[in-house]
Image (cartoon, grey):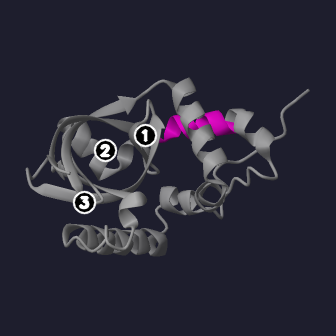
Amino acid sequence: MNEPSVEIPLPTSLLAKIMKGEPTTVKRMRKINKIVAFLYRSYIAPLLGLGFIFVLMETVGRKTGKKRFTPVEYHLLYENKITVISSRGREADWVKNMKANNTVRLHVGFKEYEAKALFIDNTDTKKELLKSYCVKYPLFSKILFGIDVRKNKHILDSEAFRSLADSLEFVAFEPINFSKQ
């Protein structure tokens, strides 16, 4: 039996708009990131509970050598390590910075520590991680990818879903040392 043709992410999803570089969406996301980064760096974000949703990644700019702060939604997906997903795949600046220098400082709530970025390259592993994310967080799955797993669970086994997982960049973090607890 042939698999029905499926387009993931759906054209109306947040990820599709980001991937297309839709100016208003990209501007909005940059503004949100700047606000969250500011709130994190001023220790307000953890007080608001954002430390349970976002990790603030401190990387070194590959061209400038300057510190760069990027808030990213995180989950304990890969081997129970903090794992982040880049919706822009390999094109995200923070991914490029980590590829140049895989030692990062993570701010998780009020905790800070150095970690090594571990890039997950295996397509099957990426698919399973994304599948786990979509099942565990169906609302975010619908907003980000346009996938309503409650109505279309079979989509998680489609070739289009596998292709989507492979296009994303998954990074897990191996702690090196803790500076605050």
Q: Residue at x 42, y 68 (%)?
A: 26
* Residue 104 seen by the camera: no
Q: Residue at x 44, y 71 (%)?
A: 23
- Where residue 46 is drawn, which disc sits there? none
Q: Nearer the viewer, residue 28 or 102?
A: 102
Q: Nearer the viewer, mark 1 or mark 3?
A: 3
Quarter of image, res 41: bottom left
Q: Position of residue 103 (x, y in %)?
A: 18, 38
Q: Secondary structure at mark 2?
A: helix
Q: CA distance from mark 1 to mark 3?
A: 26 Å
Residue at label 1?
A: 169
Pick the front one: 62 or 127: 127
Q: Which residue is mark 2?
A: 95
State which quarter of the image contains the N terminus.
Answer: top right
Rounded to the nearest angstrom, the CA distance separating label 2 from label 3 is 24 Å
Mark 2 or mark 1: whose residue is earlier in sequence: 2
Residue 92 is left or right of residue 15, and the answer is left
Closer to viewer: mark 2 or mark 3: 3
The outermost residue toward the front is 181
SS at circle 1:
strand
Residue sitting nearer the eye, 38 or 43: 43
- Distance of mark 2 from mark 1, alpha carbons? 8 Å
Q: Earlier in the sequence, mark 1 or mark 3?
A: 3
Which of the 4 image quarters holds residue 70? Answer: bottom left
- Coordinates of residue 51 in the picture (x, y in percent): 35, 61
Tell me what residue is drawn at x 54 percent, y 36 percent: 129
Question: What secondary structure is found at the residue carrying circle 3?
Answer: loop
Residue density around tag 1, few if under 14, some if 14–19, many if 20 or more, within 10 Å: many
Task: Find disc 3 in the rendering and name its residue.
Answer: 110
Query: Which residue type carries mark 1?
Result: Glu
Q: Mark 2 near mark 1, Cβ–Cβ under 8 Å?
A: yes
